[in-house]
Image (spheres, rainbow, N blue to C red):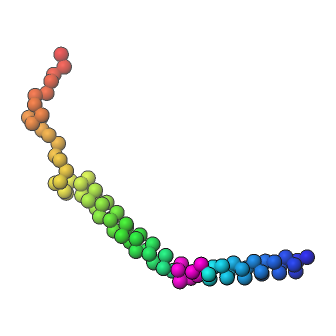
């Protein structure tokens, strides 16, 4: 009975290898990995730039953020009655 099970497993393995080769095999898989790698590098670079700008904004090194208005610019403050 074990021999029959082993035979079925080997036949299934051969069929799986043949199906893998017919769908593109290793070459197509490598192309997809390379494509994803280039996209990932692009996104990683943009994320690093965005985080760098955010850090500069938070630390006050970048003057593109609006400065808080002074009391004289916003008008007189109302005193509670």
Q: Is residue 36 above or below residue 69?
A: below
Left or right of 6? Residue 15 is left
Q: Residue at x 26, y 52 (%)?
A: 58
Q: Is residue 54 left or right of residue 12?
A: left
Q: Nearer the viewer, residue 70 or 2?
A: 2
Q: Residue 67: within the magenta?
A: no
At horizontal 78% and vertical 77% (from top left) the residue drawn is 9
Q: Determine the image quadrant of residue 12.
A: bottom right
Which of the image's four quarters has the C terminus?
top left
Residue lying furthest right? 1
In this rendering, position of residue 28 left or right of residue 60: right
Q: Which residues are the magenta region? A: 23-29
Could you tell me which residue is drawn at 40 percent across and 71 percent down? Answer: 39
Residue beneath the point at 62% across and 82% down: 21
Q: Residue 65 placed where, x, y %? A: 19, 50
Query: Quarter of the image holding residue 55?
Result: bottom left
- Quarter of the image for residue 17 reads bottom right
Indicate the quadrant containing the N terminus: top left, top right, bottom left or bottom right. Answer: bottom right
Between 65 and 60, the one nearer to me in the picture: 65
**In terms of secondary structure, what is the magenta stretch mainly?**
helix
The percent position of residue 54, horizontal first and vertical second, equals 28, 56
Expressed as whole percent of the image width and height from the top left, the position of residue 76 reads 10, 28
**In the foreground, 52 or 44:** 44
Q: Nearer the viewer, residue 77 or 22?
A: 22
The residue sitting at the top extreme is 81
């Amino acid at each position: 009975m074990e021999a029959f099970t082993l035979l079925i497993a080997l036949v299934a393995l051969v069929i799986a290898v043949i199906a893998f080769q017919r769908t593109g095999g290793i070459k197509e898989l490598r192309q997809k990995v390379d494509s994803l790698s280039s996209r990932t590098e692009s996104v990683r670079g943009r994320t690093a730039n965005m985080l760098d700008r955010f850090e500069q904004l938070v630390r006050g090194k970048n003057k593109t953020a609006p400065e808080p208005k002074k009391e004289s610019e916003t008008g007189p403050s109302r005193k509670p009655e």
